[in-house]
Structures are given as C-alpha cells and as structure tokens.
Image (cartoon, grey):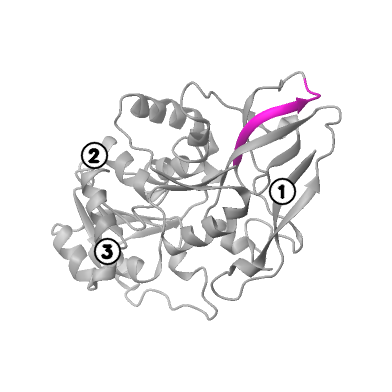
Amino acid sequence: MLSREIHLVSRPVGEPKPSDFALVTAEVPEPGPGQVVVRNTFMSVDPYMRGRMNDVKSYVPPFALNAVMDGGAVGEVVASDSPDVPVGATVLHGLGWREYALLDANRVRVVDATLAPAQAYLGVLGMPGLTAYAGLLAVAELKAGETVFVSGAAGAVGSLVGQFARLLGAGRVIGSAGGPDKATRLVKDFGFDAAIDYRAGDLRGQLREAAPDGVDVYFDNVGGDHLEAAIGAMNVHGRAALCGAISQYNATEPVPGPRNLALAIGKRLTLRGMLVGDHNDLAPQFVQQVAGWLANGEVRAEETIVDGIGGAPDAFLGMMRGANTGKMLVRL
C-alpha cells in the first residue's frame, strides 16, 4: 500500500514558504501484532506546528528534516492486528500529514462518530475545544458576570472561547479578529457582544470602547500588541490565560515585551501560560458538556477545509496568515 505524505525539507526563516515542504510517496507496512493501519480522512494544521519547524528546545520536539511531519488526524481503520481496535473503527491519533498511518493500537482513540462528525474531534471536541474550555475554567477561573476579551477570536480556539464563555455565564464577551467581515461574523454568527477589527487600527481605543467597564478575563492567542492592550484594559485582579502568540511565531529577531507590564503590579494581575496537555483531567467533563451544547445548537463549530494531502502546506500557511474562520482542516 502506498501513501503520500508531507516532509519538512528546510527550516523556515521568518514566514514558511511552500518550498520548505515536499510531497513524498512512501510504502505502508502491514500491521504487526497490536498494530493498526488507518486511512486518514481529515488532518489538522495548528499554530504550534510553526515552533516545531525550528531546531530549538521546546515543550514538543522539533520536526526532523526530510522526514514525514505529524499532528492530529482522524480516520478509519483499514487493517488491524489488534482485538481492541477493529477494522472499520473511527479513530483519533497523532500521525497526520499523511494519507495512511501505521500505529500501535494503544496510540489511537476510538471516537463516537454518531455524537459528532469525526473531524469534530480535531476541533470543537478535540484539542482546540479543550484548550478553550480549560483556559476559561482552570486557568482564567472565569466567574459569572465577568467581561471576557479574546484575541484571534475567529480562529479554531478563539471562536470557541467566546461561545463557551457566554454559555459559562460571562456578562460580556469581546473578540478581536482581522478584517470587517470576520468582526461582523463574531457578533452575528458566534454570539459575541462586541467585535474589534484590529486591522482598522487603534486597538487600545477600540478595546476601551468595547469594554467601558474594563476586562476581567483575557484569553490570549496573539501576544504582542493585543497583550499590551489587554493589560491596559484589565481590571484589578484580572486574569489572563496565555495560550498562544501567533503574531510572533515568524519573528526573526527578539520581540519586545508589553511596554505596560508594570501595570500588572498595581492591578494585581495574573498572567498564566497554559498547555492543554496539563488539563486532560477535564476531558470527560468537557466532552460531555460541549457535546450537549452541540446537540442543542448552542455552539457553532466552524470549519475551513482544504482538499488533498498536497494542499496541506497551503492550509498551514493560510492558517498562519488568518485565512481561516474556525478550524482549518485538510480533507484527505
């Protein structure tokens, strides 16, 4: 059996280019004892993957050069030598960026495709959803009636943060996105109370207008000027969940910190970094609650889909530029 897969062939300097990737055809071995072969149907592209393209120490190992990349994927088991994962099962696993994957059966999770479409386990019921849920509840410790500000609010995580915050009792939810169309959709389609188009300029002024009583919880997906604006707008004892800094991932020089960080002293702010893997204990509660919201039509799970393994690099590059609304996926 042959499988096409994406290799990283050079380490990007600044913004990645299509030439940093290569489409390669490889042979898929037959499964050995306790193994399965999965035909991937959807794979995920995520901002954290940009950091893995650099040869630096981080919380996840860097991608190797001239080797297949990896990341979240869902698919159907087409060959199995495991009694626990039969042929035909729909599974979630970590060997994306390829059409077929050989895995140990204990490295896949059988998912309920009757609860939601399989690709939902890469988005609203997967890592982005749990990130939003845990960031609000466990990291930012959201309380009823509070004002929440979300950057990157039209993306996979941010669009869910806003919706979850509303359902968890936030008094006001404000999102920032790039461009008037996305800003309009935050209010019209995702239930935000107010939206900021950061490309229109005067981010701090727009935030003051949208949050006249200040911000209690900030969910940061962007860093940079958004973090600085949020610190300026936050109320005493405000909390920030620092989830991502996509504005800085392609930087080739050290980036400046927030110029107003000293405000955190007098305001007694909590700025707390988060990794979703620290909150797997919340996963059962998260799936049960969010699946209920989905079934009731209370959460919108937006997807932007690119077709074909050959389109995976373009999907990644587009996601980094903000071309997606909701979760960026590659359909295989």
Q: Nearer the viewer, mark 1 or mark 2?
A: 1
Does dot 1 land on a helix, a strand or a loop? strand
The disc at residue 4 is: 1
Q: Main secondary structure of the magenta part?
A: strand
Q: Nearer the viewer, mark 1 or mark 3?
A: 1
Q: Amino acid at mark 2?
A: Ala
* Residue that mark 2 sits on: 144
* x then y, percent, for residue 53: 64, 64
Asked if labels 3 and 2 touch by Cβ distance under 8 angstroms, the answer is no
Q: Is tag 1's residue or tag 2's residue first in the polypeptide sequence?
A: 1
- Look at the image and tell me in which quarter the C terminus lies: top right
Res 113 seen here? yes
Q: Nearer the viewer, mark 2 or mark 3?
A: 2
The number of numbered badges drawn on the structure is 3
Give the extent of the magenta segment. Answer: 73-82
- Look at the image and tell me in which quarter the N terminus lies: top right
* Residue that mark 3 sits on: 267
Residue at image position (65%, 49%) is 97
Residue at image position (50%, 33%) is 283
Res 173 seen here? no
* x then y, percent, for residue 289: 39, 28
Left or right position of 235 against 43: left
Inspect the magenta stretch and tell me whether residue 288 lies in it.
no
Q: Amino acid at mark 3?
A: Lys
The quarter of the displayed image where residue 84 is located: top right
Q: Amino acid at mark 1?
A: Arg
Left or right position of 49 against 141: right
Q: Residues within 10 Å of mark 1 (few under 14, many from 20)?
A: some
The disc at residue 209 is: none
Residue at image position (60%, 66%) is 18
Q: CA distance from mark 2 to mark 3?
A: 20 Å
Inspect the magenta stretch and tell me whether residue 74 lies in it.
yes
